[in-house]
Image (cartoon, helix red, strand yellow):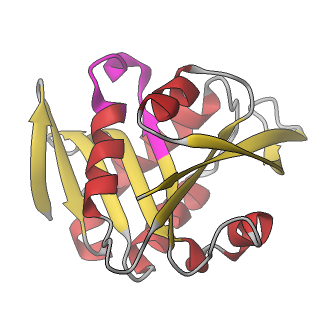
Amino acid sequence: MQHLTKIADIDIIRLHDEQEAAVYRPSFVGAYQTIFSEPPYNELFYPYEAEGVLARTLQTPDHIALLAVRGITVVGFGFAVPLAHRKDVAREVQGLLPIQPTYYLSELGMLNKVRGLGLGGELIRLRLEMINRAKYSHVLLRTSATRHAGYDMYLKRGFQDIGVYMEVHSRRIDGQVTTDRRLFLSQVL
């Protein structure tokens, strides 16, 4: 585990493997479920699904896994992986972006109680800073097509809407499975 910075009473740390993540896993699961159950996503994730997101990220070569924590309590996270390791996403942008030299900002979330402190912007900045520019020339992310504060935050940080949408099937907090639209934003590093 590597301590990167502190905002107010919140530490931002980098995890390298599942052993380092073990103490944070239960709190990450709760934070992940809470964050994505809120608008604009309103999604229901079971604990094993949230654990799987963390485990898959940590098992991916060249990953970046950042947690915003108070002690061992996770209040936010930002993950990123090489796009080539996310075949489902790469398929959607093939022909528009080069797959091998593109990095994918796969997850970003903060609990409501810590929003407005600049954590989201800092997690974006840190991930962009950590990407190996000798290997990667582009960065991609996917966000809700429903306009929200996150969309504007990305635009302010130099991301551009590339006009590509993806339909995502998700289990909602009411138990129904529905489809919602996600859009892609990109930036040249």
Nearest to the observer: residue 159 or residue 107 = 159
Where's residue 101, x and y in %? 50, 77
Q: Is residue 114 visible?
A: yes
| Residue 91 placement: quadrant | bottom right
Where's residue 40, x and y in %? 67, 25
| Residue 1 placement: quadrant | bottom left
Relative to 61, residue 89 above or below: above
Asked whether 152 falls inside the magenta stretch, the response is no
Where's residue 30, x and y in %? 45, 41
Where's residue 164, x and y in %? 78, 49
Image-based side of 114 in relation to 159, left or right? left
Nearest to the observer: residue 145 or residue 161 = 161
Asked whether 116 falls inside the magenta stretch, the response is yes
- Boundaries of the magenta span: 108-120
Nearest to the observer: residue 119 or residue 9 = 119
Relative to 141, residue 40 above or below: above
Q: Residue at x 49, y 63 (%)?
A: 138
Q: Residue at x 30, y 73 (%)?
A: 132
Nearest to the observer: residue 151 or residue 63 = 151
Q: Residue at x 26, y 50 (%)?
A: 126
Q: Residue at x 44, y 69 (%)?
A: 137
Image-based side of 104 in relation to 22, left or right? right
Check the picture and name the quadrant holding the C terminus.
Answer: bottom left
Image-based side of 90 in relation to 22, left or right? right
